[in-house]
Amino acid sequence: MGRLFGTDGVRGLANDTLSPELAMRVAAAAAQVLSRGKTRAVAVVGRDPRASGEMLEAAVTAGLTSAGVDVLSVGVLPTPAVAYLTGLYDACFGVMISASHNPMPDNGIKIFAAGGHKLGDAVEQRIEALIADGNTVRPTGAGIGRVRGDYTVEGTHERYVEHLLESTGQHLSGLTVVVDCAHGAAAEVAPQVYREAGATVIAINADPTGLNINDNCGSTHLDAVRAAVLAHGADLGIALDGDADRCLAVDATGEVVDGDAIMAVLALAMREAGELVDNTLVATVMSNLGLHIAMRAAEITVLTAAVGDRYVLEELRRGGYSLGGEQSGHVVFPRYGTTGDGVLTGLRLMARMAQTGRPLRELASVMSTVPQVLVNVPVSDKAAVAAAPEVGDAVAEAERVLGDTGRVLLRPSGTEQLVRVMVEATDPVQARQLADDLAKRVAAV
């Protein structure tokens, strides 16, 4: 059996590489590893609205109950809501069935430990080993788990909405926002939260059919939200992905405000409010050099983690920091959640606009993006190629050429046989040339 867990759970083509049989085995193994020795463990289970989620939820529920775990089914809710409810209900763990920003044919299984925290590598490896072994515990009789119906989790949607609204006391009256719900898990929650916070809300792509999630909409397809912002004269747009664990923004002129710029705006707001622990922001190695420059000017330290919000979360927990995230729009506020939350991020961004009376374009101008070129190079053995001495020499030479005017990052993909070559430089022509030269060196190994 190959590696099942990627950077964000188990993911694949639903009913093919991610079959109901595999989903059941993953759930049963996770139950055995995460039940914390309880004789009557409880797991929270939610999903996004894609059609295959119904099938996979049934399989996951069968796997959990076959292992003696009771299931609290919370229905269609964002990933951060499932993480939050896992902690709220003191469940042993939580399961979210979603492939995030992936197209509809795909699906995935995300697993949260107690408290709603993402699993570490060692725990994932234990689950994988148990799946490969196939020797999971199967109780009988009264030991079989039960599905606890909505009567035990009544109002989960409302509890999550209240939780989000409590994260900011700033009223958003006077702001008009377009929210692109990606026909996903936040199609009801996001417009409701923003309206109850006082904003005028124009919701688009908020009619999930099970087949249209992320279909030319949401955070990976920004044309729709940009057009709507301009058409309605809105103050900003918020584009969520299918499970709403991340968002990107668009200012009133239609310009994109990515995760790095969002973090820059929020870091300054939190520092001003005395909420930015140790004046430190946690980002990833993929964050733009412009973020580092802007934060350095503001005397805010930027710590870098590996790509993936789980690694950002690990660094946040390790240092007790209060803000972190990724360029892709995963932003984490540990005080309010244990994973990226796109709805919350949009709420906090609008709160800063309302508080200062400044447009998003002006707030985001604190950071100037340094031109960045990313080249994906297909290889036969990504780890061996990335570690090859001749590749290291090529990277060192590119870094020598750039000096203080840019940076180079070369890393193996987490899910594919690719080596990613990224070059940032104040001169975009130089960035492209160095990236292409490095890509050729990598491909030749």
Image: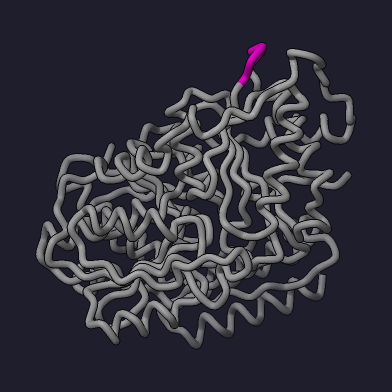
Look at the magenta stretch and give its main secondary structure.
loop
* Residue at x 29%, y 85% (from the top left corner): 230
The quadrant of the picture occupied by the N terminus is top right
- The reply, left or right, for residue 415 in relation to residue 46 is right
Image-quadrant location for residue 359: bottom left
Quadrant position of the C terminus in the picture: bottom right
| Number of marks present in the image shown | 0
Percent of width and height locating residue 164? 31, 45
Residue in the foreground of this view, choosing between 304 and 249: 249
Q: Position of residue 62 (x, y in %)?
A: 75, 34
Q: Position of residue 31 (x, y in %)?
A: 70, 27
Q: Is residue 112 visible?
A: no
Q: Position of residue 306 (x, y in %)?
A: 56, 50
Residue 353 shown left or right of residue 162 in the figure:
left
Q: Quadrant of residue 195?
A: bottom left
Residue in the picture at 83% in, 60% down: 381
Queried whether the magenta region covers residue 86, the answer comes back as no
Nearer to me, 366 or 345? 345
Relative height, residue 431 to residue 125 (above, below): below
Task: Indicate the quadrant where residue 246 lies.
Answer: bottom left
Q: For this view, does 72 lie left or right of residue 158?
A: right
Q: Residue at x 83, y 24 (%)?
A: 136
What segment carries the magenta color?
36-41
